[in-house]
Image (tube, rainbow, N blue to C red):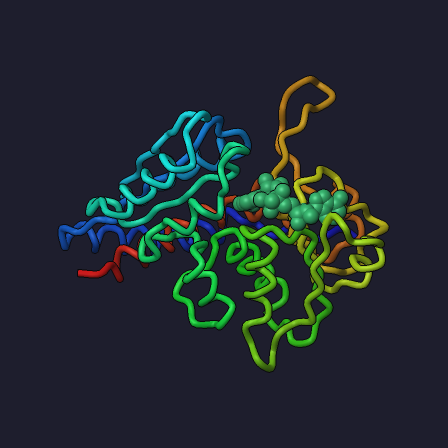
């Protein structure tokens, strides 16, 4: 068996067409959408994501700026910068690119973020709304992964669903999104670095999300035949030819057993950017007067 590949570019194009029309409507009213990306120190893994955001915003007609802070920035100065962006009338959305340098407590910086401009829904108030199912927008990577999964599994009622990874930006919000329905949610298990027998969990999943940041972590003998596998991992590795390339968390041989699989690159990644832009436009539409 060879898995059906879930094409993220096609879905992203559908989403972006709508975003573009909405961004134009906002410009017509004289209150355009404008996203600010805050980054401290070396961009690292965020570099690809930042580049894609800049390009996508330009194509969609959304303003974009990068606020680059030095890696020596103090926590107080990072918080002050987040507050400045929150008070800047031109800025309608803010994204904090993590990780921050080790001496900064990311949660404190996040707490300083203006909730009405929080495009990743990461402030305590917005995360709380996610827990309670009373949210307008959700973290973009988790939403993108779910958007793809729904194409393969429109009805998830009672499915065995396993998430590998429990970070605050991906795994935890994804679990919350999957558990939104009182009657039609899947059964969700979340695995992480301390999980004792990862294969035991993954091999009974009908729907499997991997977001560990470990290239090839998921081997084909860890996957139930016919399962839907959503590979969220984006890892830069050196190939046999010495060139750097992007791979996911699933070993390529997983395609021999899975029913559906997302390619990396070209799966969750493009949709994440499209959802981020959709979130940006929605916040701009709903901005306080
Ligand atoms: P993170 O480092 O914050 O969290 C990693 C999670 O995986 C943790 O819960 C950790 O406990 C778990 N984990 C690590 N090694 C494991 C192992 N051997 N077995 C079981 N669990 C393990 O990472 P993150 O920010 O959540 O990102 C995860 C991956 O998703 C990365 O590859 C990242 O680049 C990628 N990512 C992709 C997108 C996208 O748009 N597709 C967006 C954000 C992050």
The residue shown at (17%, 51%) is: 31
> Front-most of 211 and 168?
168
The residue shown at (45%, 47%) is: 108
Based on the displayed image, in which of its 4 quarters is residue 207 positioned?
Answer: bottom right
Left or right of 193? Residue 231 is: left
The residue shown at (64%, 71%) is: 156
Looking at the image, can residue 263 be seen? no
Left or right of 200? Residue 69 is: left
Instruction: Tell me the quadrant of ligand 1.
Output: top right
Looking at the image, can residue 190 be seen? yes
> Front-most of 153 and 31?
31
Residue at the farthest bottom position: 183
Residue 163, percent across and down?
68, 57
Left or right of 252? Residue 284 is: left
Residue at the farthest top position: 242
> Front-most of 49 and 195?
195
Residue 111, percent across and down?
41, 51
Residue 146, percent across and down?
56, 60
The residue shown at (65%, 76%) is: 157
Residue 113, percent across and down?
36, 50
| Quarter containing the C terminus | bottom left
Left or right of 58? Residue 265 is: right
- Number of numbered tags placed on the structure image: 0
């Amino acid at each position: 068996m060879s898995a059906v590949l879930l094409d993220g570019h096609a879905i992203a194009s559908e989403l972006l067409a709508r975003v573009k029309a909405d961004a134009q409507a906002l410009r017509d009213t004289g209150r355009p959408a404008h996203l600010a990306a805050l980054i401290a120190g070396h961009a690292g893994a965020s570099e690809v994501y930042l580049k894609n955001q800049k390009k996508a915003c330009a194509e969609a007609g959304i303003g974009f700026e990068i606020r680059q802070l030095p890696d020596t920035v103090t926590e107080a100065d990072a918080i002050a910068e987040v507050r400045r962006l929150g008070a800047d009338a031109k800025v309608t959305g803010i994204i904090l690119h993590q990780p921050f340098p080790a001496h900064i407590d990311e949660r404190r910086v996040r707490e300083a973020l203006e909730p009405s401009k929080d495009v990743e829904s990461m402030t305590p108030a917005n995360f709380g709304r996610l827990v309670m199912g009373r949210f307008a927008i959700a973290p973009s990577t988790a939403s993108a992964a779910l958007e793809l999964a729904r194409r393969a599994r429109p009805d998830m009622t009672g499915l065995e669903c396993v998430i590998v990874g429990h970070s605050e930006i991906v795994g935890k919000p994804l679990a919350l999104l999957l558990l939104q329905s009182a009657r039609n949610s899947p059964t969700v298990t979340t695995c992480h670095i301390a999980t004792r027998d990862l294969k035991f969990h993954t091999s009974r999943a009908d729907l499997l999300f991997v977001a560990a940041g470990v290239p090839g972590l998921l081997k084909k003998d860890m996957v139930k035949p016919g399962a839907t596998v959503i590979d969220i991992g984006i890892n830069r590795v050196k190939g046999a030819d010495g060139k750097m390339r992007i791979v996911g968390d699933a070993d390529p041989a997983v395609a021999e057993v899975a029913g559906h699989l997302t390619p990396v690159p070209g799966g969750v990644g493009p949709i994440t950017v499209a959802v981020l832009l959709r979130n940006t436009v929605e916040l701009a539409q709903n901005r306080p007067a």
